[in-house]
Every structure is written in structure tokens, then in C-alpha cells.
Image (cartoon, rainbow, N blue to C red):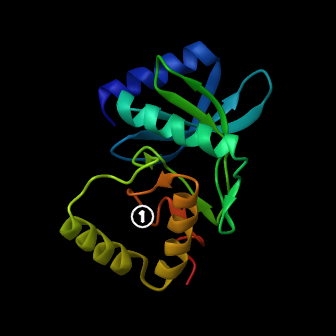
Amino acid sequence: MDNKLIQQAERYIMKRNVLLTKQLGIGIHGVVYVAIDKQKMERFAVKIHRYKEAYQRECAIYRRLAKLEVYQIQGCNVPLLLGQDDEIYAIEMTIVSRPFVLDFAGAYLDHPPDFPENVWDDWEKEKIAHFENDWPAVEFILAEFRMHGIFLYDISKNNISFRDPGYV
């Protein structure tokens, strides 16, 4: 993890008086931890973003989902926005269990990314190979998000998951 994320996480801990425990994930946009509110003893997830743009995009997606009261997409759980910190680029959200759809920092609101057709074709081929037999279910998930004006592009088995990774 880079120094910027470590510093942001340390600032978040001090500002919010929370304990960051297990790391749930790390990627190009940031890092996600299980956080515990020391006063309420409640658990939630917190994502510390590297970049303002990705943070703002993800906040906008969560606000749209909250406004529309969307808690599930095609039977998959979607985290609920609990809070945000515009200074640290932190989003607090509920922890969800599988099946789930997570990570909206790479999503677009109200319009898809403006990529040439061949890029879309390559993207789709890569995702079909990646998701294999789950691809039809993923297509339904993407279509329902599009109905809400949300265009997911950064998808993987880490952020659209139907079963535990060890499940055969």
C-alpha cells in the first residue's frame, strides 16, 4: 500500500475514533477495511480512496442507489452508504455478504464511458472469459444498473461475487 493511503487511513482513524481491522480489499482506487466504531462497537466497511475523482464518482453512485432505495440488484446485495469524508476521500458503508455487487469507483453516472466500439468488444470478450458460466447473470446485473443510470465498467469476480471463492 502506498504512503498516501496509509496517511489517509491514519487521519481517518484519528478523526473518527475508529479501529481499522481486517483489510477487505485493495485496488487501483483505494483500500477497504472493516472498521469498528469504538463508542458504539458497530462494524462497517470503510474505503479510503487514492484519488478525488474516483471518490466523487463512487459517492455519486451510492447517493443514487440510496435515493432509489436500491439494496439489491438481481438478488445481489449492494452496500448502503453510511457516511463520507470529503477531506480524506473515505466512504463508510455497510458490510454485505455474498452474493454481492461492490466497488463503484470505476462506474459512470447517467452515461457510459466514451470508448470506441472495438474497446467495448474486447472488454466484453475479456469479461465473458473471466466470468465464464456466470456471464449471463452478470449481464442481467449490468442491465439493471443501467436502468438506474449507473454504468459499471470495472467489474471482476472480486466485486460481483455469487459464491465464496473456494466454492466448487
Side (left or right) of 158 relative to 113 = right
- Residue 43 visible within the image: yes
**Label 1 SS:** loop
In the displayed image of the protein, which residue is found farthest to the right? 40
Name the side, left or right, on which 84 lies relative to 77.
left
The image quadrant that residue 117 belongs to is bottom left
Query: Residue, x 44% and y 37% (percent of image)?
Result: 57
Residue shown at 37% from the left, 47% from the top = 27
Q: Position of residue 22 (x, y in %)?
A: 56, 43
Toward which corner of the image does residue 5 lie, by quadrant? top left
- Residue at 64% of width from left, 48% of height from top? 79
145 vs 111: above or below = below
Q: Classify the position of the N terminus by image quarter.
A: top left
Name the spot of residue 77 as percent of width and height, x first.
67, 58
The residue nearer to you, when weighing 113 against 15, is 113
Residue closer to the observer: 84 or 1: 84
- Spot occupied by residue 115 in the image (x, y as percentages of width and height): 24, 57
Label 1: few (<14), some (14–19) or many (≥20) C-alpha neighbours in 10 Å: some
Q: Is residue 151 above or below residue 137?
A: above
Decide: is 26 above or below 116: above
User: Which residue corresponds to mark 1?
Assistant: 156
Percent position of residue 165, x then y: 52, 71
